């Protein structure tokens, strides 16, 4: 594991703070902002391990505070149960795959997500379609979460297309994210792939992330969420290119 200098630790803390701010503003953004930045300094596997506790803690808190919205998304069991075998697949990929494979896969998925959002800014699912697709989304989200630490490229387009209220939207993604993170943690422990040092790093990473969640909530009155989303997506694009370039040309 690489030893980090103070400037690198500062950049990581800023990335976690930015992710926490995005989480407070839109309900999304913590792993999408923080994992690629951390991966540039720590490697993809260590970055994914580090983000497990911040993602779990923040999403459990959101799930609990917004639990009154659960009736708006009856498909939740169809999302959650298929995610479990998906996590098993993704955990195996993370444990056995090379850094080059993981970095490339993460970069490609980020670019695919950005392309999908650009081509289909307004998607709509209703009735049987949302019920049929839910298990596939859950399985894919579980695989992505365990392998790369980011399940939003699979989950978010589906949730966006359900036409939920803003509170129910945040509840839906937070519930799935917290379930995936908790299962991922158990899987890593069972594989003896989560050391005490990694757990300590992950718990420390909670601090800058959770401190800045209220900052994101405050920013809602100052910055339109779609503007902040555009900034995040621009950052994601640059970081995805950096991951792919670093995997193949450095």
Image (cartoon, rainbow, N blue to C red):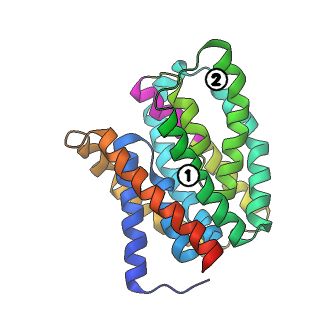
Q: Is residue 199 left or right of residue 17?
A: right
Q: Nearer the viewer, residue 37 or 95?
A: 37
| Screen quadrant of the N terminus | bottom right
Residue at 65%, 63% (x, y): give it: 104
Q: Which residues are magenta?
A: 165-176
* Label 2 residue SS: loop
Tell me which secondary structure the magenta stretch mostly adopts: helix
Q: Residue farthest to the left?
A: 222
| Screen quadrant of the C terminus | bottom right
The residue identified by callout 2 is: 75
Q: Position of residue 113 (x, y in %)?
A: 55, 45
- Which of the 4 quarters of the picture holds residue 98? bottom right
Distance from disc 2 to disc 1, alpha carbons, whole Å, reads 27 Å
Residue 111, numbered label: 1
In the rendered image, the vertical position of residue 45 relative to residue 109, given as above or below: below
Q: Nearer the viewer, residue 3 or 247?
A: 247
Tag nearer the camera, 2 or 1? 1
* Label 1 residue SS: helix
Q: Position of residue 156 (x, y in %)?
A: 54, 37
- Which of the 4 quarters of the picture holds residue 19? bottom left
């Amino acid at each position: 594991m690489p030893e980090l200098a103070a400037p690198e630790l500062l950049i990581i803390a800023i990335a976690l703070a930015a992710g926490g701010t995005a989480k407070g503003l839109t309900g999304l953004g913590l792993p999408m902002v923080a994992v690629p930045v951390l991966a540039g300094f720590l490697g993809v596997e260590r970055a994914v391990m580090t983000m497990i506790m911040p993602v779990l803690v923040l999403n459990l808190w959101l799930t609990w505070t917004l639990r009154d919205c659960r009736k708006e998304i009856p498909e939740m069991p169809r999302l959650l149960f298929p995610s479990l075998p998906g996590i098993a697949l993704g955990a195996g990929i993370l444990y056995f795959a090379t850094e080059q494979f993981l970095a490339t896969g993460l970069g490609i998925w980020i670019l695919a997500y950005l392309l999908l959002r650009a081509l289909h800014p307004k998607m709509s699912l209703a009735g049987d379609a949302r019920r049929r697709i839910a298990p596939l989304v859950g399985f894919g989200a579980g695989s992505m979460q365990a392998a790369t630490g980011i399940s939003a490229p699979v989950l978010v387009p589906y949730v966006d297309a359900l036409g939920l209220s803003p509170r129910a939207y945040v509840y839906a993604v937070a519930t799935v994210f917290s379930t995936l993170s908790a299962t991922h943690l158990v899987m890593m422990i069972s594989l003896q792939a989560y050391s005490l040092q990694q757990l300590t790093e992950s718990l420390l990473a909670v601090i800058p992330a959770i401190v800045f969640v209220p900052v994101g909530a405050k920013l809602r009155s100052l910055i339109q969420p779609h503007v902040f989303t555009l900034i995040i997506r621009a950052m994601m694009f640059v970081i995805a290119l950096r991951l792919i370039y670093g995997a193949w040309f450095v």
